Image (cartoon, helix red, strand yellow):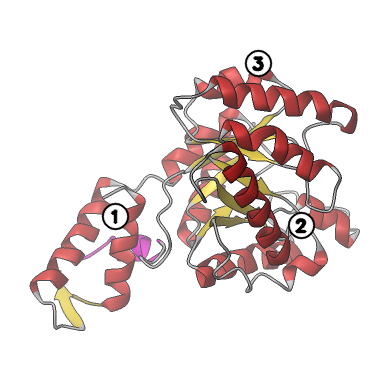
């Protein structure tokens, strides 16, 4: 009997743009020591932060540190992205001018709307051309739920240039709502924030891009982190943001397909390749159809196959 279909069914469909970074680790832009540690660690992708983890007075120095780090990492062992400040601040364009010429792999835009994401794309087009970089070589991730109005725009990201992934955040949204907390004592999301998470998942799927789970602020409880990351993968998220190196191991484990899952997916794909005109087939005594095929292909794409 096929015991792996439920798990594979939770994986993204093949129509979602390929995304392989399981763990996305934030590193404060004003901490060269933490960046050095992160580069030697197991995170799949590093996000150099110029926004929330950097005090207002430290932002100019952080900008210089990040620009220097990008310049030093010419041949990169792993992708280096930068979270800039929101587009409605005086820092955003200054951040871009300082860092684009050093070719970050991508930009994370916080507190964003689809319109601001498109505007950022126009800025990047001009700055790439000025720096002699390949057009659209710098990609985008948007943090799409950090303001109340942004929740109503999560279905509007389809076709936005450069956009590879959509993620969400609960901390700024709690501040926007005036909420005292966004999680209960066990770490479970309270209702408004669970809704934001679901809308992010739906918005990313509608746009054909990868949904990325937000951070869990608790980095000391490895068992909780295992549960949180596995639950995110089960729902269809493609990776998870981390705020501490201790979260990377559980995250990578959760988002790494097992050998059994991959074998199930390969068998599904092979079965439909052998029967190209079939809409439904039998495997191990169970019926499988086109949605299963899409899920299998998505799982294999997640594994880089």
Residue hosting label 2: 146
Distance between mark 1 and mark 3 Cα atoms: 36 Å
Residue found 59% across the figure and 27% down from its top: 70
Q: Locate residue 161, reporting x and y percent.
A: 55, 61
Q: Locate residue 17, reporting x and y percent.
A: 42, 60
- Between residues 233 and 290, which one lies in front from this camera angle? 290
Say whether residue 26 is left or right of residue 280.
Answer: right
On residue 300, the disc is: 1
Region in magenta:
1-11
Quadrant for residue 252, please give it. top left
Q: Is residue 17 above or below residue 74?
A: below
Q: Quadrant of the N terminus?
A: bottom left
Whether residues under marks 1 and 3 lie with C-beta atoms below 8 angstroms apart, the answer is no
Residue hosting label 3: 33
Find out whether residue 77 is within the magenta segment.
Answer: no
Q: Residues within 10 Å of mark 2 (few under 14, many from 20)?
A: many
SS at circle 3:
helix
Q: Locate residue 120, reporting x and y percent.
A: 68, 54
Distance between mark 1 and mark 2 Cα atoms: 32 Å
Residue 230 seen anywhere in this rendered image of the structure: yes
Counting every numbered tag in the picture gives 3
Distance between mark 3 and mark 2 Cα atoms: 29 Å
Q: Locate residue 201, reporting x and y percent.
A: 57, 65
Residue found 47% across the figure and 61% down from its top: 236
Residue found 80% across the figure and 31% down from its top: 54
């Amino acid at each position: 009997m096929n015991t792996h279909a439920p798990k594979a069914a939770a994986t993204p469909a093949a129509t979602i743009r390929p995304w392989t970074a399981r763990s996305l680790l934030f590193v404060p832009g004003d901490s060269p020591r933490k960046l050095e540690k992160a580069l030697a660690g197991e995170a799949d992708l590093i996000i150099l932060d110029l926004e929330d983890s950097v005090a207002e007075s430290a932002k100019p120095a952080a900008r210089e540190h990040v620009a220097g780090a990008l310049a030093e990492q010419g041949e990169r062992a792993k992708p280096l992205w930068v979270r800039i400040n929101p587009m409605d601040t005086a820092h955003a364009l200054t951040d871009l001018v300082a860092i684009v010429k050093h070719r970050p792999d991508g930009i994370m835009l916080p507190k964003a709307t689809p319109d601001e994401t498109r505007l950022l794309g126009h800025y990047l087009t001009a700055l790439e051309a000025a720096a002699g970089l390949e057009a659209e070589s710098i990609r985008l991730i948007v943090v799409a739920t950090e303001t109340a109005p942004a929740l109503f725009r999560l279905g509007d990201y389809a076709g936005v240039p450069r956009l590879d992934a959509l993620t969400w955040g609960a901390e700024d949204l709690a501040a926007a709502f005036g909420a005292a907390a966004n999680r209960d004592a066990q770490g479970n999301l309270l209702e408004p924030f669970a809704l934001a998470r679901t809308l992010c998942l739906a918005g990313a799927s509608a746009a054909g891009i990868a949904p990325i789970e937000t951070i869990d602020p608790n980095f000391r409880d490895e068992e909780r982190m295992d549960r949180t990351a596995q639950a995110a993968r089960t729902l269809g998220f493609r990776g998870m943001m981390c705020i501490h190196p201790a979260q990377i191991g559980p995250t990578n484990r959760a988002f790494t397909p097992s050998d059994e899952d991959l074998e199930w997916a390969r068998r599904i794909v092979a079965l439909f390749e052998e029967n190209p005109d079939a809409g439904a087939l039998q495997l191990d005594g169970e019926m499988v159809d086109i949605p299963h095929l899409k899920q299998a292909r998505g799982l294999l794409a997640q594994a880089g196959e």
